[in-house]
Amino acid sequence: MVYVFLAHGFEEIEALAPIDILRRAGVELVTVGVEDEYITAAHKVTFAADITVDKVVLDENVDMIVLPGGMPGTINLENNDYVQAAIDYCVKNDKYIASICAAPSILGHKGLLKGKKAICFPGFEKDLEGAVISEKSVEVDGKFITAKGAGVAVDFALTLVSELVSAAKAENIRKGIQCQN
């Protein structure tokens, strides 16, 4: 099970690319409205989440959480106690945490990236406290997957498939959607 957290002001493509591509891979995925069932993204597109954040079940079925970036979406994610509890659960239980754009700053502020390779939207590096800043667009270090921003959202999503399912499945999806290497 993958939970994709949607907070008002999230960057649309950073959430939708992982949702689409993970579902193509057959991964069970639930979108989670952080403030409400209907969430308005950064560019004024409103989405209906599958569930609200208070319905999230943190148990052995959770494989990954995804934190899209965008502003003020990232701030809204970071300020939510349920999102913080989900992050803590994943760390404690060795589950994946995937974050893109400004959202890796949430992990940095918690001290979770110390000594780990990570990347974020340019200008947020100072918030990745103790991280080794990667030169890659998408970085995997253990159970932490970070990415630069909207322009690499498909690569980010394919990396999630690679980690959760297989590299072969990710490559088949890449070819199927006509995405260049």
Image (spheres, helix red, strand yellow):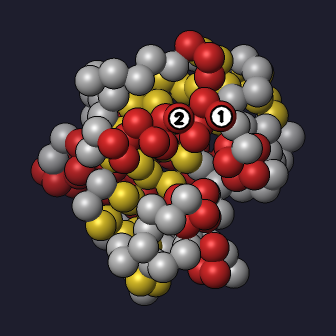
Q: Mark 2 touching mark 1, by CB under 8 A?
A: yes
Instruction: Please say whether residue 27 is visible from this viewpoint.
Output: yes
For disc 1, the neighbor class at 10 Å (few under 14, some 14 to 19, many from 20) is: few
Residue in the image at 23% along x and 50% along y: 163
Q: Which residue is mark 2?
A: 85
CA gap, disc 2 and disc 1: 6 Å
| Up-down relation of residue 140 to residue 130 (above or below) | above
- Which numbered disc covers residue 16? none
Name of the residue lying farthest toward the right: 44
Q: What amino acid type should be assigned to the residue bearing mark 1?
A: Asp
Image x and y of residue 130, in percent: 48, 79
Quadrant assignment for the N terminus: top left
Q: Count the marks: how many?
A: 2
Q: What amino acid type should be assigned to the residue bearing mark 2?
A: Ala
Image x and y of residue 141, in percent: 30, 67
Instruction: Please say whether residue 178 is visible from this viewpoint.
Output: no
Q: Quadrant of residue 140?
A: bottom left
Q: Secondary structure at mark 1?
A: helix
Residue in the image at 48% along x and 74% along y: 119
Q: Nearer the viewer, residue 70 or 95?
A: 95
Quadrant assignment for the C terminus: bottom left
Residue in the image at 30% along x and 34% along y: 63
Q: Which residue is mark 1?
A: 81
Q: Nearer the viewer, residue 165 or 145?
A: 145
